[in-house]
Amino acid sequence: MRLTLELRIMGGSNVIMAPQAGNNLTASIEILTIPDADRDGEWQDFMQRVSDKWMAYKDNDNILLNTRPHWAKDWEGLTLGEGKSKRDAREYLRNVSYKDAIPSFKATLAEIGKEQGWGLADVRARFSNELWDKIVYS
């Protein structure tokens, strides 16, 4: 880490796909670096080591927290999870972190669309991208 670390404590969220969803409190941690750390290959390894630490956090009952990265931050190429659940970040988000949220999100979108005269295929065609296709629509 060659620049800064930002830590914000915030409340939970009722936004279905928000990283804070379902939490009473959330610690949002962002690490930053300068461009040369990214070019020399050190940054990806550093992000992985930090992510491994964060993914191991447990609550007072010794249960792993549902640690989720911010959608707009740099997490591509990481492996997330702990033990048997460790996998590619996209797979982890789809099959672990947002496993229950994704069907709820799609059902809510479909319900809104039904009232408005559009469907999930319309939303996907207009607003989706490769990442969202892999995590939400696969």
Image (cartoon, helix red, strand yellow):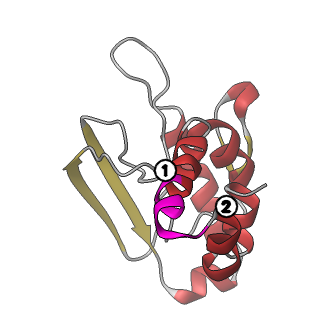
Percent of width and height locating residue 59: 37, 22
* Residue at image coords 41%, 53%: 18
The verdict on residue 137 being magenta is no
Query: 35 or 99: which is nearer to us?
Result: 99
Helix, strand or loop for disc 2: helix
Q: Residues within 10 Å of mark 2 (few under 14, many from 20)?
A: few
Nearest-to-viewer mark from 2 and 1: 1
**Depicted 110 relative to depicted 35: above or below:** above
Q: Amino acid at mark 2?
A: Asp
Q: Is residue 129 left or right of residue 138?
A: left
Percent of width and height locating residue 83: 70, 27
Q: Which residues are magenta?
A: 111-118
Report the residue marked by disc 1. 108
**Depicted 79 relative to depicted 5: above or below:** above
Percent of width and height locating residue 123: 61, 72
* Residue at image coords 50%, 25%: 64
Query: 71 or 45: which is nearer to us?
Result: 71
Report the residue marked by disc 2. 45
Q: Is residue 122 left or right of residue 84?
A: left
* Residue at image coords 56%, 47%: 107
Question: Which is more N-terminal, label 1 or label 2?
Answer: 2
Q: Is residue 100 left or right of residue 59?
A: right
Q: Residues within 10 Å of mark 1 (few under 14, many from 20)?
A: few
Predominant secondary structure in magenta? Answer: helix
Q: Quadrant of residue 8?
A: bottom left
The verdict on residue 114 being magenta is yes
In the rendered view of the protein, which quadrant contains the C terminus?
A: bottom right
Query: 46 or 81: which is nearer to us?
Result: 81
Helix, strand or loop for disc 1: helix
Q: Amino acid at mark 1?
A: Thr
Percent of width and height locating residue 118: 59, 70
Query: 126 or 115: which is nearer to us?
Result: 115
